[in-house]
Structures are given as structure tokens and as C-alpha cells.
Amino acid sequence: QVQLVESGGGLVQAGGSLRLSCAASGRSVSTYAMGWFRQAPGKEREFVGSISWTGTITNFADSVKGRFTISRDNTRNTVSLQMNSLRPEDTAVYYCTISRVPYTSHLRGPYDYWGQGTQVTVSS
């Protein structure tokens, strides 16, 4: 069993930045891809970005490309999401997740453990 705990959410003005962190426990996550999804009120959970097990490959949703980056520290079992140039439409609960496979995916299918989420609110 893997536990994922997100932190770093909060309220920020448009144009600002936030850094979300996710700490994993229960087993090493170093050989699995990890991802971030988000869910806004009244909307379905959507893909934000993912990072391969080595950290060398990342991919992002078009809506955040160029503004968000993902990094991971396999020695600490953590993954981070750096969010810059935030927009009101980025407001959502952000979820950390771990895949069953080493490679990135924008689909929910490969991801089998999820954190409880952290709220990000961007004011205009």
C-alpha cells in the first residue's frame, strides 16, 4: 500500500507561483512514473503532468505547458509540481498519483494510488 500526501496549496493572485509537493510512503516509488491531476468544481478530474521513473521525461497538458514543471527526488520519495504564471482557470484541487508503470501517461488508467488532494485557488 502506498500513501501519498500533497502539500503546498493555497491562495495566490493571478500571475503568481506555487510549488506543490507530494511525499510517498509505504514503498519506494523510484521505479514508477508519477503524475499530477486536478479537479475543478463541477468538472471531471483532468491530467496536468507526469514524470517518468528516471525523471528524464515529462509531459504536460496543453493548458499548462510552458508554465508548469515537474521534478522528482527518488532518494526522498517525493515529486513536486512548480506552477508559474498562474491563472484563475488553474483553480482546482490538485492530486498526486503514482503509476503502475515506469513511463508517463496522460490517461488515468495506469495510475493506481492517489493522494487526498490540495486546494489551489488563483484570484483574478
Image: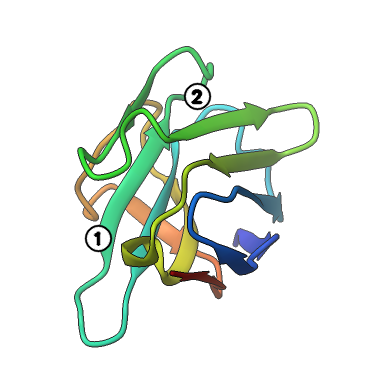
Residue name at image x 62 percent, y 40 percent:
79
- Give percent across and percent down for residue 94: 47, 64
Look at the image and tell me in which quarter the C terminus lies.
Answer: bottom left
Q: Seen from this angle, which residue lies furthest bottom?
A: 42
**Disc 2 residue crowd, few under 14, some 14–19, many 20+, Cα 10 Å:** many
Q: Is residue 70 above or below residue 120?
A: above
Residue extending farthest to the front is: 124
Of residue 114 and residue 31, the one placed in the foreground of this image is 114
The picture places residue 46, in percent across and down from the top left corner, at 25, 60
Tell me residue 13's x, y (percent). Answer: 56, 63
Viewer-side residue, 6 vs 54 = 6
Frontmost of labels 1 and 2 is 1
| 12 to the left or right of 40 | right
Element type at mark 1: strand
In the picture, the disc for residue 122 is none
- Identify which amino acid the numbered label 1 is placed on: Glu
Total marks in image:
2
Residue at figure coordinates x 70%, y 41% from the top left: 78
Real-space Cα separation, disc 1 to disc 2, in angstroms: 21 Å
The residue closer to the viewer here, 53 or 35, is 35
Q: Residue at x 24, y 41 (%)?
A: 61
Indicate whether 111 appears above or below 114: above
Residue behind mark 1: 46
User: Any mark on residue 53, and which?
Assistant: 2
Coloring basis for residues: rainbow
Q: Residue at x 48, y 58 (%)?
A: 14
